[in-house]
Amino acid sequence: MSVLVCFHAHPDDEVFNTGGVMRLAADAGHRVVLVTATDGALGEYPEGILAPGQSLADRRRLELEESARVLGADRVVMLGYADSGMAGTEDNSNPVAFANVDRDTASRRLADILTEERTDVLTIYDANGGYGHPDHIRVHDVGVRAAEIAGIENVYESTVNRDHFRELVKANPAWEENDSSVPDIEQMGLPADQITTAVNVVAAMPAKRAAMHAHATQIGDFGPFRDMPDEQLAAAFGTEWFRRVGAPAGTKETALPL
Protein backbone atom coordinates (compact mmCIF):
# COMPACT_ATOMS: atom_id res chain seq x y z
CA MET A 1 0.00 0.00 0.00
CA SER A 2 1.21 3.50 -0.87
CA VAL A 3 0.12 6.82 0.63
CA LEU A 4 -1.13 9.70 -1.51
CA VAL A 5 -1.46 13.14 0.10
CA CYS A 6 -3.29 15.83 -1.88
CA PHE A 7 -2.73 19.38 -0.60
CA HIS A 8 -5.33 21.96 -1.64
CA ALA A 9 -6.21 25.56 -0.87
CA HIS A 10 -9.98 25.51 -0.22
CA PRO A 11 -12.77 23.02 0.31
CA ASP A 12 -13.90 22.01 -3.24
CA ASP A 13 -10.49 22.40 -4.91
CA GLU A 14 -9.89 18.69 -4.47
CA VAL A 15 -12.57 17.80 -7.01
CA PHE A 16 -11.41 19.31 -10.30
CA ASN A 17 -7.77 18.33 -10.59
CA THR A 18 -7.18 15.43 -8.18
CA GLY A 19 -10.61 13.92 -7.52
CA GLY A 20 -10.01 11.22 -10.09
CA VAL A 21 -6.57 10.16 -8.91
CA MET A 22 -7.84 10.13 -5.33
CA ARG A 23 -10.72 7.81 -6.19
CA LEU A 24 -8.58 5.53 -8.36
CA ALA A 25 -5.87 5.35 -5.69
CA ALA A 26 -8.46 4.43 -3.06
CA ASP A 27 -9.99 1.80 -5.32
CA ALA A 28 -6.53 0.28 -5.80
CA GLY A 29 -6.14 -0.08 -2.04
CA HIS A 30 -3.86 2.88 -1.35
CA ARG A 31 -4.27 5.30 1.55
CA VAL A 32 -5.54 8.74 0.51
CA VAL A 33 -5.13 11.82 2.69
CA LEU A 34 -6.67 15.20 1.83
CA VAL A 35 -5.18 18.35 3.39
CA THR A 36 -6.90 21.71 2.93
CA ALA A 37 -5.12 24.94 3.87
CA THR A 38 -8.02 27.35 4.40
CA ASP A 39 -11.58 27.39 5.69
CA GLY A 40 -12.98 28.78 2.43
CA ALA A 41 -14.90 31.43 4.35
CA LEU A 42 -14.69 34.01 1.55
CA GLY A 43 -16.32 31.87 -1.12
CA GLU A 44 -19.51 33.02 -2.79
CA TYR A 45 -22.66 31.02 -2.10
CA PRO A 46 -26.38 31.13 -2.94
CA GLU A 47 -28.59 33.17 -0.66
CA GLY A 48 -30.56 31.09 1.82
CA ILE A 49 -28.46 27.95 1.54
CA LEU A 50 -26.96 28.14 5.03
CA ALA A 51 -28.86 26.79 8.02
CA PRO A 52 -29.83 29.29 10.74
CA GLY A 53 -26.71 30.25 12.67
CA GLN A 54 -24.45 28.29 10.36
CA SER A 55 -21.28 29.96 9.10
CA LEU A 56 -19.99 29.40 5.59
CA ALA A 57 -16.79 27.90 7.02
CA ASP A 58 -18.79 25.34 9.01
CA ARG A 59 -20.92 24.44 6.00
CA ARG A 60 -17.91 24.08 3.72
CA ARG A 61 -16.23 21.78 6.23
CA LEU A 62 -19.26 19.47 6.10
CA GLU A 63 -19.26 19.61 2.30
CA LEU A 64 -15.56 18.80 2.23
CA GLU A 65 -16.06 15.78 4.47
CA GLU A 66 -18.78 14.44 2.17
CA SER A 67 -16.71 15.09 -0.96
CA ALA A 68 -13.71 13.35 0.64
CA ARG A 69 -15.88 10.35 1.49
CA VAL A 70 -17.09 10.10 -2.09
CA LEU A 71 -13.54 10.41 -3.43
CA GLY A 72 -12.22 7.73 -1.09
CA ALA A 73 -10.11 9.77 1.32
CA ASP A 74 -9.15 7.95 4.50
CA ARG A 75 -8.30 11.16 6.37
CA VAL A 76 -9.14 14.86 5.99
CA VAL A 77 -7.03 17.56 7.64
CA MET A 78 -8.03 21.23 7.59
CA LEU A 79 -5.11 23.44 8.57
CA GLY A 80 -7.65 26.19 9.32
CA TYR A 81 -5.92 29.25 7.85
CA ALA A 82 -8.05 32.22 6.86
CA ASP A 83 -9.10 32.45 3.22
CA SER A 84 -7.07 35.09 1.34
CA GLY A 85 -9.76 35.90 -1.21
CA MET A 86 -9.33 36.36 -4.95
CA ALA A 87 -6.29 38.22 -6.23
CA GLY A 88 -6.63 41.99 -5.99
CA THR A 89 -9.21 42.03 -3.18
CA GLU A 90 -8.84 43.74 0.19
CA ASP A 91 -8.71 40.37 1.94
CA ASN A 92 -5.29 39.77 0.37
CA SER A 93 -3.83 42.12 2.99
CA ASN A 94 -5.21 40.21 5.98
CA PRO A 95 -2.07 39.31 7.97
CA VAL A 96 -3.53 35.99 9.15
CA ALA A 97 -4.69 34.93 5.69
CA PHE A 98 -2.93 31.87 4.31
CA ALA A 99 -1.14 33.87 1.61
CA ASN A 100 0.56 35.95 4.32
CA VAL A 101 1.41 33.42 7.02
CA ASP A 102 4.99 32.45 7.74
CA ARG A 103 5.99 29.95 5.07
CA ASP A 104 8.26 27.85 7.26
CA THR A 105 5.67 27.51 10.00
CA ALA A 106 2.98 26.37 7.57
CA SER A 107 5.44 24.09 5.78
CA ARG A 108 6.43 22.38 9.00
CA ARG A 109 2.78 21.75 9.86
CA LEU A 110 2.31 20.05 6.52
CA ALA A 111 5.66 18.25 6.78
CA ASP A 112 4.57 16.76 10.11
CA ILE A 113 1.53 15.26 8.38
CA LEU A 114 3.64 13.97 5.50
CA THR A 115 6.05 12.31 7.90
CA GLU A 116 3.31 10.88 10.10
CA GLU A 117 1.59 9.38 7.06
CA ARG A 118 4.84 8.06 5.52
CA THR A 119 3.82 9.77 2.32
CA ASP A 120 4.84 8.30 -1.03
CA VAL A 121 3.29 10.92 -3.34
CA LEU A 122 2.35 14.54 -2.65
CA THR A 123 0.26 16.68 -5.00
CA ILE A 124 0.38 20.48 -4.85
CA TYR A 125 -0.24 23.18 -7.51
CA ASP A 126 1.99 24.67 -10.18
CA ALA A 127 3.89 27.86 -9.32
CA ASN A 128 1.01 30.10 -10.45
CA GLY A 129 -1.52 28.11 -8.47
CA GLY A 130 -3.32 27.04 -11.62
CA TYR A 131 -4.84 30.46 -12.22
CA GLY A 132 -3.17 32.99 -9.94
CA HIS A 133 -5.21 32.74 -6.75
CA PRO A 134 -3.02 33.83 -3.78
CA ASP A 135 -3.96 30.79 -1.69
CA HIS A 136 -3.17 28.42 -4.54
CA ILE A 137 0.22 30.02 -5.10
CA ARG A 138 0.88 29.64 -1.37
CA VAL A 139 -0.04 25.95 -1.55
CA HIS A 140 2.73 25.56 -4.11
CA ASP A 141 5.29 27.43 -2.00
CA VAL A 142 4.37 25.68 1.24
CA GLY A 143 4.08 22.29 -0.43
CA VAL A 144 7.51 22.49 -2.04
CA ARG A 145 9.14 23.43 1.26
CA ALA A 146 7.22 20.80 3.23
CA ALA A 147 8.35 18.11 0.81
CA GLU A 148 11.94 19.21 1.31
CA ILE A 149 11.57 19.05 5.10
CA ALA A 150 9.88 15.64 5.03
CA GLY A 151 12.11 14.21 2.31
CA ILE A 152 9.30 13.50 -0.15
CA GLU A 153 10.72 12.74 -3.60
CA ASN A 154 7.52 12.26 -5.59
CA VAL A 155 5.97 15.73 -5.74
CA TYR A 156 3.43 16.43 -8.48
CA GLU A 157 2.13 19.87 -9.39
CA SER A 158 -1.55 19.61 -10.25
CA THR A 159 -2.29 21.86 -13.20
CA VAL A 160 -4.51 22.48 -16.22
CA ASN A 161 -3.43 21.58 -19.73
CA ARG A 162 -3.73 25.04 -21.25
CA ASP A 163 -3.71 23.77 -24.85
CA HIS A 164 -6.38 21.18 -24.14
CA PHE A 165 -8.58 23.76 -22.39
CA ARG A 166 -8.16 26.20 -25.29
CA GLU A 167 -9.50 23.56 -27.68
CA LEU A 168 -12.44 22.83 -25.36
CA VAL A 169 -13.40 26.50 -25.33
CA LYS A 170 -13.26 26.65 -29.11
CA ALA A 171 -15.42 23.55 -29.39
CA ASN A 172 -18.04 24.71 -26.89
CA PRO A 173 -20.46 27.18 -28.47
CA ALA A 174 -21.75 28.20 -25.02
CA TRP A 175 -18.34 29.63 -24.10
CA GLU A 176 -18.04 32.87 -25.99
CA GLU A 177 -14.65 34.57 -26.18
CA ASN A 178 -16.09 37.70 -24.57
CA ASP A 179 -17.96 35.78 -21.86
CA SER A 180 -16.72 36.97 -18.47
CA SER A 181 -17.35 33.48 -17.03
CA VAL A 182 -14.55 32.08 -19.16
CA PRO A 183 -11.17 32.55 -17.44
CA ASP A 184 -8.17 33.98 -19.25
CA ILE A 185 -6.82 30.82 -20.85
CA GLU A 186 -3.31 32.21 -21.12
CA GLN A 187 -3.19 32.55 -17.32
CA MET A 188 -4.38 29.00 -16.67
CA GLY A 189 -2.19 26.02 -15.94
CA LEU A 190 0.70 25.08 -18.19
CA PRO A 191 1.20 24.44 -21.91
CA ALA A 192 1.14 20.79 -22.89
CA ASP A 193 4.89 20.59 -23.45
CA GLN A 194 5.54 21.39 -19.78
CA ILE A 195 3.24 18.67 -18.47
CA THR A 196 4.84 15.36 -17.53
CA THR A 197 1.88 13.34 -16.37
CA ALA A 198 -1.60 12.80 -17.82
CA VAL A 199 -3.78 10.41 -15.85
CA ASN A 200 -6.94 8.99 -17.43
CA VAL A 201 -9.60 9.18 -14.70
CA VAL A 202 -12.72 8.53 -16.80
CA ALA A 203 -13.51 5.52 -14.60
CA ALA A 204 -13.76 7.88 -11.63
CA MET A 205 -16.12 10.40 -13.27
CA PRO A 206 -19.22 9.26 -11.34
CA ALA A 207 -17.35 9.99 -8.10
CA LYS A 208 -16.10 13.36 -9.39
CA ARG A 209 -19.66 14.33 -10.34
CA ALA A 210 -20.97 13.26 -6.93
CA ALA A 211 -18.21 15.28 -5.24
CA MET A 212 -19.27 18.34 -7.24
CA HIS A 213 -22.81 17.90 -5.92
CA ALA A 214 -21.45 17.58 -2.37
CA HIS A 215 -20.22 21.18 -2.56
CA ALA A 216 -23.68 22.69 -2.78
CA THR A 217 -22.58 26.17 -1.66
CA GLN A 218 -20.16 26.33 -4.58
CA ILE A 219 -22.70 26.02 -7.35
CA GLY A 220 -21.14 29.13 -8.90
CA ASP A 221 -18.06 27.01 -9.61
CA PHE A 222 -19.67 23.65 -10.28
CA GLY A 223 -23.05 24.69 -11.68
CA PRO A 224 -22.11 24.51 -15.38
CA PHE A 225 -20.58 21.05 -14.91
CA ARG A 226 -22.68 19.17 -12.35
CA ASP A 227 -25.30 18.02 -14.84
CA MET A 228 -23.18 18.11 -17.99
CA PRO A 229 -23.63 15.04 -20.24
CA ASP A 230 -21.16 12.26 -19.43
CA GLU A 231 -19.25 12.64 -22.68
CA GLN A 232 -18.71 16.36 -22.20
CA LEU A 233 -17.77 15.97 -18.54
CA ALA A 234 -15.22 13.32 -19.46
CA ALA A 235 -13.76 15.57 -22.16
CA ALA A 236 -13.34 18.40 -19.66
CA PHE A 237 -12.28 16.49 -16.54
CA GLY A 238 -11.56 12.89 -17.61
CA THR A 239 -7.82 13.53 -17.60
CA GLU A 240 -5.93 14.99 -14.65
CA TRP A 241 -2.69 16.77 -15.46
CA PHE A 242 0.51 17.14 -13.45
CA ARG A 243 4.12 18.27 -13.71
CA ARG A 244 6.48 16.10 -11.70
CA VAL A 245 8.94 18.26 -9.78
CA GLY A 246 12.48 17.57 -10.92
CA ALA A 247 11.48 15.29 -13.79
CA PRO A 248 13.97 15.01 -16.69
CA ALA A 249 13.05 16.87 -19.87
CA GLY A 250 10.70 14.89 -22.07
CA THR A 251 9.19 12.85 -19.23
CA LYS A 252 5.76 11.50 -20.10
CA GLU A 253 3.77 9.44 -17.59
CA THR A 254 0.23 8.09 -17.43
CA ALA A 255 0.02 7.42 -13.69
CA LEU A 256 1.30 8.58 -10.31
CA PRO A 257 3.90 6.27 -8.73
CA LEU A 258 1.58 4.49 -6.29
Image: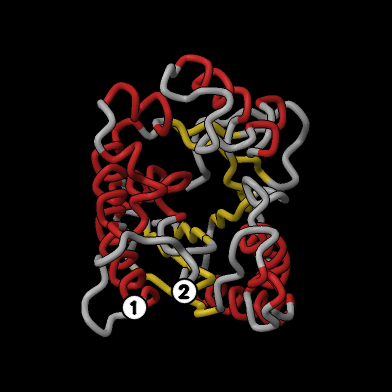
Name the element at disc 2. Answer: loop
- The colour scheme is secondary structure
Q: Amino acid at mark 2?
A: Asp
Q: Earlier in the sequence, mark 2 or mark 1?
A: 2
Where's the N terminus, which quadrant? bottom left
Look at mark 1 in the image and give the residue it sits on.
58
Q: Quadrant of residue 59?
A: bottom left
Q: Residue at x 51, y 23 (%)?
A: 176
Q: Nearer the viewer, residue 200 or 209?
A: 209
Name the element at disc 1. Answer: helix
Q: Nearer the viewer, residue 105 or 228?
A: 228
Residue 47 rendering spot, x and y as whole percentages: 30, 64
Q: Residue at x 31, y 46 (%)?
A: 28
* CB contact under 8 Å: marks 2 and 1: no
Q: Residues within 10 Å of mark 2 (few under 14, many from 20)?
A: many
Residue 184 rendering spot, x and y as whole percentages: 64, 35
Q: Residues within 10 Å of mark 1 (few under 14, many from 20)?
A: some
In the image, taking residue 67 as reference, residue 13 lies left or right, namely right
Label placed on residue 204: none
Q: Quadrant of residue 82?
A: bottom right
Work out whether 22 lies above or below 95. above
Residue 35 rendering spot, x and y as whole percentages: 48, 68
Q: Amino acid at mark 1?
A: Asp
Q: Residue at x 72, y 63 (%)?
A: 141
In the image, taking residue 189 as reference, residue 16 lies left or right, namely left
Look at mark 2 in the image and give the residue it sits on.
39
Question: Alpha carbon of mark 2 to alpha carbon of mark 1: how far?
Answer: 8 Å
Q: Quadrant of residue 163?
A: top right
Q: Residue at x 48, y 44 (%)?
A: 17
Image mark count: 2
In the image, taking residue 123 as reference, residue 87 lies left or right, namely right
